[in-house]
Image (spheres, grey):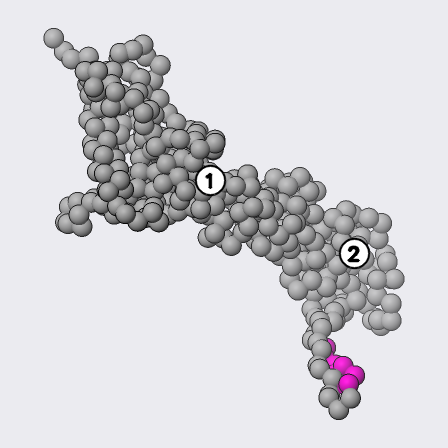
């Protein structure tokens, strides 16, 4: 008689669970016997060739933020009162592209074993997989020890064939295991900006302020979607705040919006802002002057940038709206002619005092 494939699959899961439980038992024994109250993570596996190191991190460390070492058995506790997505807790969307997988214990494993349960009946926890791990497993010709396809196939089957399920949300009080191909920045998200506390420390952002630079765009959008600087309200230094250029604050440049990372969105030589910004392409010269002296002390030198072109900038009042007398910073031409030429011919007020015999001499 051919064995039931679901039973074989469940036996494989039970074996993995027992191995991880053994790791947890050793970890808790070490922590219970240590006299140091400040010890929150400790290497417990001997550093010998062929032995994978193991770490245990308490809930307090998850609040602060921690780095889960790559290629190690890592046990972590989720702080009480927390409900957080797997992706955010384990490093965000960028880390999700890497390979990692893990298991959250149900808390019933020891009791199930004491009750004499075996195979699929012993297992009732939840696995989780990064997108990178899912893709790797789908491309693999034969299943591995943490077979995602097998779990998905058996999920929802009537007991005792399987109790397998996938964890996408971590909740307070859980104890979980993870194995990763890269170091993972792990932690809770104190300010709900989708950047966990470990990543906030890495980027230098404020873990208690969802918009560190107060430009109107949340830190998570700036880091993971827009690629703008969460510490600088004007990433491209065109004079327009990032939140002004990204009007709907979704981190994507859409119709009618200028780019917060390119000072000249339409590449026509005129800045999205008024032309005075440090990132603007308009030619400038550095002008310095000496401040008035005070008593016997000479005044300090002060310098500023001065435009050397009569036609500069498209959004002259820096309000991210195309008003009368302004050209559209998302289009390089106005009525079929380059924006700079249109402004020179149509609005001479933008270049008072300048003398030129032709528009072609102005660039």
Name the residue rendered at 24%, 42% in the picture: 33
Q: Residue at x 23, y 38 (%)?
A: 29
Q: Which quadrant of the structure image shows residue 143?
A: top left
Q: In percent of the image, x 29 and y 22: which residue is there?
A: 108
Question: x and y percent of residue 168 in the render?
Answer: 42, 29
How packed is label 1: few (under 14 Cα within 10 Å), some, or many (20 or more)?
Answer: many
In the depicted structure, whether residue 182 falls above or below residue 112: below
In the rendered view, does 341 fall on the left or right side of 168? right
Residue located beneath label 2 in the image: 316
Q: Quarter holding the C terminus?
A: bottom right
What's the magenta region?
Answer: 287-294
Q: Distance from label 1 to label 2 (Cα)?
A: 43 Å
Which quadrant holds residue 299? bottom right
Tell me which label, 1 or 2, sits earlier in the chain: 1
Left/right of residue 227 with respect to residue 55 in the rendered view:
right
| Dot 1 and dot 2 residues touching (CB under 8 Å) | no
Q: Height in image: 10 above or below 127?
A: above
State the SS at label 1: loop
Judged by depth in the image, the label closer to the viewer, 1 or 2, is 1
Q: Crowdedness of circle 2 by 10 Å Cα count: few (<14), some, many (20+)?
A: many
Confirm whether residue 92 shows in the render: no
Under circle 2, the secondary element is loop
Q: Position of residue 48 (x, y in %)?
A: 15, 49
Mark 1 = which residue?
Answer: 188
Residue lying furthest front:
35
Residue 207 in the image: state x and y as whole percent.
Answer: 53, 47
């Amino acid at each position: 008689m051919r064995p039931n494939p679901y039973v074989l699959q469940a036996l494989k899961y039970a074996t993995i669970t027992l191995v991880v439980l053994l790791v947890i038992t050793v970890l808790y024994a070490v922590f219970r016997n240590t006299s140091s109250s400040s010890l929150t993570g400790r290497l417990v596996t001997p550093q010998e060739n062929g032995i994978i190191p193991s770490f245990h991190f308490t809930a307090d460390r998850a609040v602060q933020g921690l780095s889960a070492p790559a290629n190690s058995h890592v046990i972590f506790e989720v702080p009480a009162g927390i409900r957080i997505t797997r992706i955010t807790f384990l490093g965000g969307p960028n880390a999700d592209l890497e390979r990692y997988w893990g298991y959250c214990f149900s808390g019933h494993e020891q009791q199930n074993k004491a009750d004499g349960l075996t195979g699929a009946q012993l297992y009732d926890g939840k696995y989780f997989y990064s997108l990178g791990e899912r893709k790797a497993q789908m491309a693999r010709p034969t299943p591995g020890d943490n077979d995602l396809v097998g779990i998905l196939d058996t999920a929802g089957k009537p007991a005792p064939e399987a109790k397998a399920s996938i964890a996408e949300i971590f909740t307070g009080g859980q104890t979980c295991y993870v194995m990763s191909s890269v170091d993972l920045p792990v932690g809770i998200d104190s300010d709900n900006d989708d950047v966990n506390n470990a990543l906030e420390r890495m980027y230098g952002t404020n873990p208690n302020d969802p918009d560190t630079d107060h430009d109107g765009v949340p830190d998570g959008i700036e880091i993971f979607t827009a690629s703008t600087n969460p510490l600088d309200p004007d990433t491209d230094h065109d004079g327009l705040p990032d939140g002004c250029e990204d009007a709907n604050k979704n981190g994507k440049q859409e119709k009618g919006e200028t780019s917060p990372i390119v000072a000249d969105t339409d590449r026509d030589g005129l800045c999205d802002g008024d032309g005075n910004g440090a990132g603007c392409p308009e030619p400038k010269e550095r002008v310095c002057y000496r401040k008035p002296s005070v008593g016997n002390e000479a005044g300090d030198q002060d310098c500023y940038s001065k435009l050397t072109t009569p036609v500069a900038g498209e959004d002259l009042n820096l309000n991210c709206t195309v008003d009368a007398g302004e050209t559209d910073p998302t289009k390089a031409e106005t009525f079929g002619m380059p924006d700079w030429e249109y402004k020179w011919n149509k609005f001479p007020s933008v270049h008072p005092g300048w003398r030129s015999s032709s528009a072609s001499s102005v660039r």
